[in-house]
Image: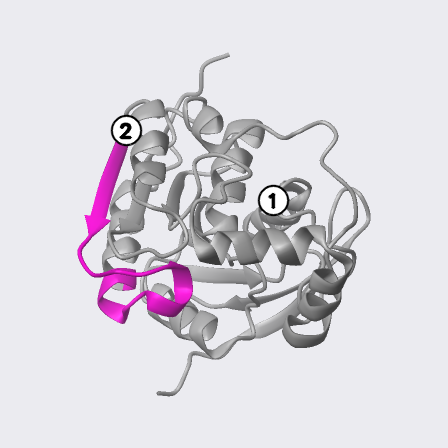
Amino acid sequence: MSFAANFPVMLRTDDGVRIDAAHTPSRGRGDLGIVVAHGFTGSWRDRTARRIVHVLSGFGGVVAFDFRGHGHSGGETTVGDLEVLDLDAAVRHARIIGYSCVAVVGFSMGAAVAVRHAALYRGVDAVAAVSGPARWYYRGTKPMRQVHWAIERPVGRWAARMVKRTRIARGRWDPVPMAPHEAAGLISPTPLLVVHGDADTFFPVDHAHQVFDAAREPKELWIEPGYGHAESAATPALIRRVGAWISTNATKDRTFPA
């Protein structure tokens, strides 16, 4: 499969972190920009991520980027806290290069960041949260216990750096950021799409229901039969459906409450 051409760019966050990103021009709506936020240990340069960008570029221009501590970006990951600054830099870039409507598609950690960003910044026109957690510190599945081992143990952080090129910040959150399900209640009237697989081995479907139930209209919930977790399990057909939902629901003609 050949991918659409992308144009690398280096962004800078409000706290001074360099963010590696790329812009893929639209093959669809000229006014719509779609920002893609990857999951923990991911990168926009991964083949799976580039496949997703290629599909979404059929609906709008795509800005994909590496969160801090990932890939070619600077800094260290805080696993969902300060990453809202990274996403905001990408959203601002999409506006600067001419997209009047900007939507965000987040996967796993990126889904949590996308929901929190929409609540804190009110700067996007639609949000799709795919395979995201509803609450922090979840350890109810083996993969999530492994994630916590990587985050909390020196040998785990070393392994993440060596194997996944992911640099993890030491220490605990202080303060603990707003949980995704709490943030979901604050983003209306921005449309929210929650997508989750019934075969997700990281977060069971009650996470999706908790986010969806906390959100106000407009909102939509897709529980996908047989779908696993995040980018690696997402089929082109599912991504096309997400792109079509964004194209239908993203509009700049919304009034936010004071």
The quadrant holding residue 56 is: bottom left
Left or right side of 171 for 88? left
Amino acid marked by disc 2? Pro
Can residue 126 be seen here? The reply is: yes
Q: Secondary structure at mark 1?
A: loop
Q: Which residue is mark 2?
A: 218
Amino acid marked by disc 1? Gly
The quadrant holding residue 14 is: top right
Residue 46 in the image, given as x and y percentages of width and height: 52, 75
Residue located 42% across and 46% down the image = 132
Q: Residues within 10 Å of mark 2 (few under 14, many from 20)?
A: some
Q: Residues within 10 Å of mark 1 (few under 14, many from 20)?
A: many
Residue 69 in the image: above or below residue 220: below
Residue located 34% across and 30% down the image = 210
Residue 201 in the image, given as x and y percentages of width and height: 36, 57
Task: Confirm or deny contact between disc 1 and disc 2 (CB under 8 A).
Answer: no
Q: Secondary structure at mark 2?
A: loop
Q: Which residues are magenta?
A: 219-239
Q: Which residue is mark 1?
A: 80
Left or right side of 180 for 201? left
